[in-house]
Amino acid sequence: MQHTATISRLKATGAPPRLSGFAQWADRHFKWLLVAPAVLLILALSVYPLLFSLVVSFINYDFQVPGHAFVGLKNFERVVFDPVARWSLLLTAWLSGISVAIEFVLGLLVALTMVRSFPGRGVIMSILIVPLFISPVIVGQAWTLLLQRPFGPTNYILTQLLGQEVTIGWMTESPWLYVSLIIADVWQWTPFMFVILLAGLTAIPPNLYEAAELDGVNAWQAFWAITLPHLAPMMLLALTFRLLDAIRMFDTIFIMTGGGPGTRTYTASYYLYTVGFTQFHLSQATAGSWLFLIFTALVVMLLVRRLLKTEPV
């Protein structure tokens, strides 16, 4: 009754109720309390594992060797002097470079074709972007079924077209195993290039082409003088995002070739997976992950620096 009377008296006088010490502190730091759960979640799921992995890279964290003795830079040395690691890094750069280049050219050609309106354009665009929504694991499995010898239809179709028997081992013979990986990657990610480049093309003012046409400029000259300079920032943006994703290639390799035959299709990601989760050399895998992170960060810095300097003419 006394508490109720006090509240009634405060309402009558118009004075705000007096808060307790904790309530006053919570009121002053209310905005920080709102973001605290998100910050704690980030610390628990991102920062802590990152710092823990850095510690693991300097100790002997190996399931096959007891104890966690400090070994300094030995884990990094094992990765640097491992010929399989060097091969995987070289193959990563080679596969990602070729795949992204082909995807860029095809995406640009498709974007130039689809930038103009024509009957059925919406339906065709919807079909073109379908591969983007398919899991890389499913893509790898689908291409394995298409290319697998002797049951896949690819060799049969080539035999009918060429008029002679074709028995290519797409997942076992070199260089066809690399060709099969590039085909699967290009099929899935060319729509990504197409979507970004199409957005860049639609942003170019149409009056520039109209003025060029009045000046007697043909389509090829307009492409070099208008389209390419204005599309350059979007081109570099598409190449940057796609290249950063391509160097992490793992899913399709895991499904289609399993890293084989031998270590021929070991990319950097697959090498780290094999060392850490098949051979259980977690310290070496963690050290390799940090080296790969530094390499990726350098690539990102170079690409972003170039992207910031690129402006439409």
Image (spheres, rainbow, N blue to C red):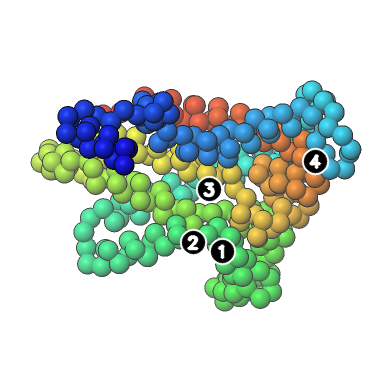
Q: Secondary structure at mark 1?
A: helix
Marks 1/2: CA–CA distance: 7 Å
Badges 1 and 4: C-beta atoms under 8 Å apart? no
Question: In the image, what residue type sits under mark 1?
Answer: Ile
Name the residue carrying label 3.
Answer: 99
Instruction: Say whether disc 1 or disc 4 marks the residue closer to the N-terminus.
Output: 1
Badges 4 and 2: C-beta atoms under 8 Å apart? no
Q: For residue 180, which quarter of the picture?
A: bottom right
Badges 1 and 2: C-beta atoms under 8 Å apart? yes
> Does the image show residue 80?
no
- Name the residue located 69 percent from the left edge and 64 percent from the top edge: 169
Question: In the image, what residue type sits under mark 2?
Answer: Ile
- Residue farthest to the left? 214
Marks 4/2: CA–CA distance: 33 Å
Q: Which numbered tag is attached to residue 281?
A: 4
Marks 1/3: CA–CA distance: 19 Å
Question: In the image, what residue type sits under mark 4?
Answer: His
Instruction: Say whether disc 1 or disc 3 marks the residue closer to the N-terminus.
Output: 3
Name the residue carrying label 2.
Answer: 134
Name the residue carrying label 1.
Answer: 138
Question: In the image, what residue type sits under mark 3?
Answer: Ser
Closest to the observer: 189 or 34? Answer: 34
